[in-house]
Image (cartoon, rainbow, N blue to C red):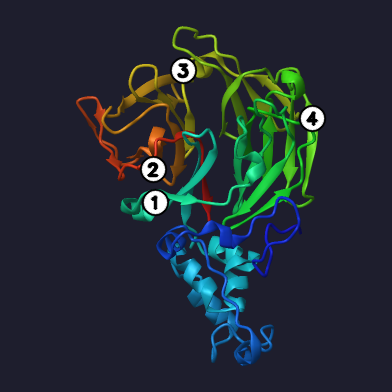
Amino acid sequence: MQSCSNPKGTKTNMEGFYSESENFVQTENTLDNDQSVEVENSGPGRNSESDPEVSPLIPGLPDDIALFCLARVPRRYHALLKCVSRKWRDLVCGEEWYSYRKKHHLQESWIYALGRDKSEQLCCYVLDPARLKRGWKPILGLPHRCIRRKGVGFEVLGKKLFLFGGCGWIEDATNEVYCYDAAMNKWNQAASLVVPRCYCVSEVFDGKIFAIGGIGPNSSNVPSWETYNPETLNWTLRENSNIFPDIEDSIVLDGKIYICGVSSPLTPAVPAFFFEPSSTTWQPAAFDLASGWHGPAVVVDGMLYVLDQSSGTRLMMWQKDIRQWVAVGRLSPLLTKPPCRLVAVGNNIFIIGKGLSTVVFNVENARNMDGVLMSTSIPKSISDDDVISCKAITI
């Protein structure tokens, strides 16, 4: 299994690798970002870990009991756990830890936002929904080869975040892919796309990443999609003429991937298609669903929500039983700064706009007061970055 890490946390001459030590500015940010400082003893003082494979996680306890205890430590303290010993670090970064927390419903979701700053460089931030008052924290050390690209894909699979494709003013579309392991806090170069892509959309479906459409070399349209299999670590290419240019958004709803073209309230005939898994084909989506898809979308508990930003910010919901779009309510213009992106954690929709302005709306406990949605917001960021995409990583 290919790893996105270097177990010793040191720089190598392998292109595309970024040392964890490059990601820290101060201790406080380190702990808030779940970014760990590698601690290694050297010399004769290493007697306590002379044989880390044999030594227990916690002296006097079987390892399964130790795991039972440690796995219940909140995610914001995982950086501290990794500083205790090499064996604890390997545990917290490993698949056993990830699987145990998932099996016992101990996982916590953090939100990752990909943005672009004033200097036109890509930037990445992380937010712990359990500590909203702490606000967004930067993740440093993005791969230098892609920080000035536009149209970069942004997707999460398991505990890993992927940046793929993109292009620039003097650079054609690329097939490069970079992987960030959120547990290890490490970047590495991953398997390349089959076809260079820029401005493609992506979704996770059936345990695989789907990279769909986009612009190829020489600004050509790419009527194809490809899937990344984490078991084989490879991309597989498929073509279909229904993959149209200018795909604006995508969602997974009712066991299907939907893609939507550039939308406008003045042009109700929005191109939209869905992926039918049984036949691996793309078919036209129903007109009534596509006609109201004007803006970024998110699915919460099987319900589709769209943020209409044509006049202020209004949240719309697709009611499948009556096949109509229903207005949920408007958000205060004092809290949101369009253009916004959406991401869901549990029953909460996070509406994230320019400068990382963030509003949290609970779809279950929402109340409508004079047409304005009741919501909460988090402290404003000092940045004025444009937000490109938002995803959640659950560990």
Residue 141 numbered tag: none
Reading the image, the residue beneath label 3 is 292
User: Label 3 crowding class (10 Å Cα cut-off): few <14, some 14-19, many 20+?
Assistant: many
Alpha-carbon distance for marks 3 and 1?
Answer: 29 Å
Is tag 2's residue or tag 4's residue first in the polypeptide sequence? 4
Alpha-carbon distance for marks 2 and 4?
Answer: 35 Å
Is tag 2's residue or tag 1's residue first in the polypeptide sequence? 1
- Left or right of 157 on screen, residue 238: right
Is tag 2's residue or tag 3's residue first in the polypeptide sequence? 3
- Left or right of 385 on screen, residue 270: right
User: Label 1 crowding class (10 Å Cα cut-off): few <14, some 14-19, many 20+?
Assistant: some
Residue 129 numbered tag: 1
Is tag 3's residue or tag 1's residue first in the polypeptide sequence? 1
Residue 392, percent from left and from top:
51, 47
Alpha-carbon distance for marks 1 and 4?
Answer: 37 Å
Q: Nearer the viewer, mark 3 or mark 4?
A: 4
